[in-house]
Image (cartoon, helix red, strand yellow):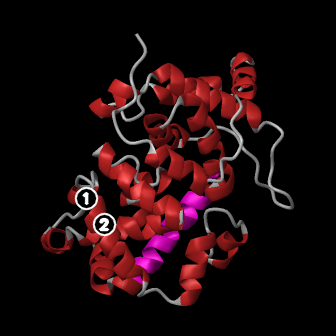
Amino acid sequence: MPKAKPNKPTIRSKCWKLLLEVHHVSAQEYISLVKQGKPQEYSKIRNDTFRTLATDRKFLDVVEEDSLIRVLCAFAWSTQATSIEDTDVSFTYVQGMNVLAAPFLYTMTEMEAFYSYSNFIKNCCPLYVQPTLQGVHCGIKLLEESLCKIDVELYDYLKSKRLSAELYAFPSVLTICACTPPLDQVMQLWDFLLAWGIHLNIICIIAQMYLIRDELMSHASPMKLLRIFPDLDADKVIRETIRMVKLLPDELYDLLVRHPYDPTVAEKIGW
C-alpha cells in the first residue's frame, strides 16, 4: 500500500519550488528517465538509500525507499552529460546525496521532488556533490574561520582539545543539517536556508554549538557532546545565525556565500 504524504499545508512545497525556480515539471520526462533503469552509480545508490534517516519514524512512514532510489537514479541519468560551463564541475552520485533528497521527498510528490532536488543540487550546491566533496571541505574550513571570528574563546578551547571542524561538523555540512533530528525542525531550518542561501548552514552549525556552549567549555572531552549534535531547535538556531552573521568580515562572508558553487574559493582559502 503506498505511503501517504504528511497531512500538512502545501505552502511549503509551493514555496520551495518557487525559491528553487522549478518552472518545469514533466511526468513524461521523469518516467522516461526512470525507465532507463540502473545507472552506473546504482550500487552506490543502493548502498545508501536503505539507511537514509533510518531512525526517523516520520520519514519512514511517509517515504518509500523505492521512491528515493528512483529520484537518485533519474538524477544520475539526467546529469550524465551535464557540466557547469568553463569549470571542471560535473555530476555523479556521491556520499550524502541520498540525505539531501530526503526533505524533498518528505514534502512533495516524487516527481516534484525530483525537479526540486535537481535544481537544488545543480544551482545551490554543485560543489558539495563532486567526487572530492570540494564544497563540503571548503565549508568546513570556512566554519573554523567563522567560529574564530564569532567566538574565539570557544574556538581556542576546541583547538586546545585538538578538535577540528573536520571531526565534528562533517555530517552537518555534508547534509545541510538534514542528519540532525527531528525532521520537522530540519524542514523549518531548510525554509530559512532556501530563502536566504544554503551558505548560512555553516553559521547554523556554529549556532547549534553555541546553544550548548557552556557544556562544551566545561567538558573535559567536548567531542563526546559533538559526536551527535543535540536535537535541532530551528527557531533558536535561526535567531543565533542572524545575530552571528553580522559579526563576520565582508570578505569572509563573501567566501561563505560562494563556496557551494564557485571553484575559485578553494584556492583563496588554501584548500
| Highlighted range, magenta | 132-148
Report the side of 195 relative to 88 (left or right): left
Report the side of 200 relative to 220 (left or right): right
Residue drawn at x 34%, y 68% is 238
Circle 1 is placed at which residue position?
Answer: 233
Name, please, the residue furthest toward the top.
1
Pick whichever, 29 or 127, lies toward us: 29
Total numbered badges shown on the rendered structure:
2
Secondary structure mainly formed by the magenta segment:
helix
Circle 2 is placed at which residue position?
Answer: 237
Residue drawn at x 28%, y 53% is 227
Q: Is residue 162 visible?
A: no
Q: Is residue 13 above or below residue 236?
A: above
Name, please, the residue furthest toward the right.
86
Q: Amino acid at mark 1?
A: Asp
Helix, strand or loop for disc 2:
helix
Q: Position of residue 157 (x, y in %)?
A: 26, 78
